[in-house]
Image (cartoon, rainbow, N blue to C red):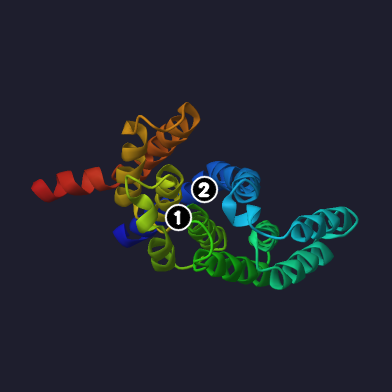
């Protein structure tokens, strides 16, 4: 009979973690989508783009006008074609945008998840890009894996370097990794990261609040099932 209670308890823990990710994990995705605007600002304002031909800028402007008239599949195809043809900052921006478009569909479409992951991984290995953008690509690849229930080890591989104190994406990487640990039934590791998030003076009040909510959720997960108490007392007699 105790095996049945243990199985139910484990199932409840998984349900709690899944509900927490569904309710709050989207904040990470939303922040990621917003960052694409930062990517555009960083790329267009850097020497990386400034040294490119003016014609590339004009071609990108023309692409944006075309995209406004297209459905998502055609839009992604146009972005990818542009990225393949442009060896400059605008090509990189197009690839980021296409990868984000794939990622938005990754929860329900494994093909889209694979495409987003491949694109972000490719961007993270592009040595022509500033390290900050390569790190951003690693973060997004990990988020795609989390959202599509990919390998925990693959997420750790992409986020490991981003968790360093001197990395500008540490706070987002820490939150993503903690959510991954929750999803994969590793509450102790998740708790450690959320506590670090709360204790970090650099995080925003909203980020700290999310971490507090997650810790409250984990408190229920880490509390021993009530059914264990009578069993323990009986064993002492």
Judge by depth and name the residue closer to the eye, 41 or 136: 41
Do we see residue 157 in this rendering?
A: yes
Q: Which mark is residue 158?
A: none
User: How many numbered tags mark residues here?
Assistant: 2
Task: Determine which residue is flagged by label 2.
Answer: 21
Q: Where is residue 42 in the image (x, y as percent from the top left)?
A: 59, 47
| Residue drawn at x 75%, y 64% as measured from the top left | 79
Which residue is at the front of the view, 228 or 131? 131
* Label 2 with label 1: CB-CB less than 8 Å: yes
Q: Position of residue 20 (x, y in %)?
A: 50, 44
Left or right position of 193 against 207: left
Element type at mark 1: helix
The residue carrying mark 1 is: 183
Can you give x and y, in whole percent of width and height, for residue 232 in the image? 17, 47
* Left or right side of 82 for 184: left
Mark 2 Cα shell of 10 Å, populated few (<14), some (14-19), many (≥20): many
Disc 2 versus disc 1: distance between alpha carbons?
7 Å
């Amino acid at each position: 009979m105790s095996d049945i209670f243990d199985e139910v308890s484990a199932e409840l823990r998984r349900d709690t973690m899944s509900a927490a990710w569904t309710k709050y994990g989207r904040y990470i995705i939303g922040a990621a989508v917003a960052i694409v605007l930062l990517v555009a600002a960083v790329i267009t304002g850097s020497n990386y783009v400034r040294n490119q031909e003016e014609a590339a800028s004009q071609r990108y402007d023309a692409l944006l006008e075309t995209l406004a008239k297209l459905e998502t599949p055609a839009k992604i195809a146009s972005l990818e074609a542009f990225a393949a043809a442009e060896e400059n900052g605008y090509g990189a921006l197009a690839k980021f945008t296409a990868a984000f478009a794939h990622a938005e569909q990754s929860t329900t479409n494994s093909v889209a998840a694979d495409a987003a992951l491949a694109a972000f991984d490719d961007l993270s290995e592009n040595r022509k890009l500033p390290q900050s953008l390569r790190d951003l690509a690693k973060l997004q690849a990990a988020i795609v894996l989390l959202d599509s229930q990919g390998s925990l080890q693959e997420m750790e591989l992409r986020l490991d370097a981003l968790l360093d104190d001197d990395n500008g994406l540490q706070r987002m990487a820490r939150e993503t990794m903690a959510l991954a640990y929750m999803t994969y039934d590793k509450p102790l590791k998740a708790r450690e990261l959320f506590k670090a998030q709360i204790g970090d003076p650099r995080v925003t009040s909203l980020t700290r609040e999310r971490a507090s909510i997650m810790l409250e959720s984990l408190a229920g997960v880490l509390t021993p099932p009530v059914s264990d108490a009578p069993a323990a007392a009986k064993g002492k007699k």
